[in-house]
Image: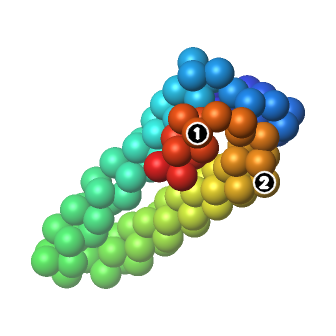
Amino acid sequence: MVECMKTVAKLDVELTVEERNLLSVGYKNVIGARRASWRIMSSIEQKEESKGNENNVKLIKSYCQKVEEELSKICSDILTIIDQHLIPSSTTGEATVFYYK
């Protein structure tokens, strides 16, 4: 859903309320899944550290870093779309406020 809505957002037209909500929910789900993964891995990392399993800790840290990089890329992606396409093409105050929010 994110890829489809990203394509629509890049058309440089004002999105309808439904389209804005789809874009928001799509990115919320993608980010939420990675945040949940990161929290689980962080918890496992702490448990493995307390057990003294350094090999597992090393692997988990690399997975956490990968998830952090994915999150950073996703956030950067939506911020670029908002700044370059959505805010410039919004004509109503409601849409502009939605994007700043």
**Up-down relation of residue 5 to residue 32 (above or below):** above
Residue drawn where x is 50% and y is 70% of the image = 65
Q: Which residue bears the numbered disc 1?
A: 93
- Mark 2–mark 1 CB contact (< 8 Å): no
The amino acid type, in three-letter code, at marker 2 is: Gln
- Quarter-of-image position of residue 70: bottom right
In the image, residue 14 lies at what x, y percent?
74, 30
For marks 2 and 1, give the CA distance: 17 Å
Q: Is residue 57 left or right of residue 59?
A: left
Frontmost residue, 67 versus 62: 67
- Quarter-of-image position of residue 5: top right
Frontmost residue, 73 versus 62: 73
10 Å crowding of disc 1: few (<14), some (14-19), many (20+): few
Residue drawn where x is 49% and y is 31% of the image = 25
Q: Secondary structure at mark 1?
A: helix
In the image, residue 17 lies at what x, y percent?
57, 22
Q: Secondary structure at mark 2?
A: helix
Frontmost residue, 57 versus 68: 68
In the image, residue 15 lies at what x, y percent?
69, 27
Q: Which residue bears the numbered disc 2?
A: 84
Q: Is residue 81 left or right of residue 98?
A: right
- Quarter-of-image position of residue 56: bottom left
**Up-down relation of residue 31 to residue 18 (above or below):** below
Eye-nearest disc, 2 or 1: 1
Residue drawn where x is 58% and y is 39% of the image = 93
Quadrant the N terminus occupies: top right
10 Å crowding of disc 2: few (<14), some (14-19), many (20+): some
Q: How is the image coloured?
A: rainbow
In the image, residue 27 lies at what x, y percent?
54, 39
Q: Going from the N terminus, do you reach mark 2 or mark 1 first?
A: 2
The amino acid type, in three-letter code, at marker 1 is: Gly
Frontmost residue, 50 versus 84: 84
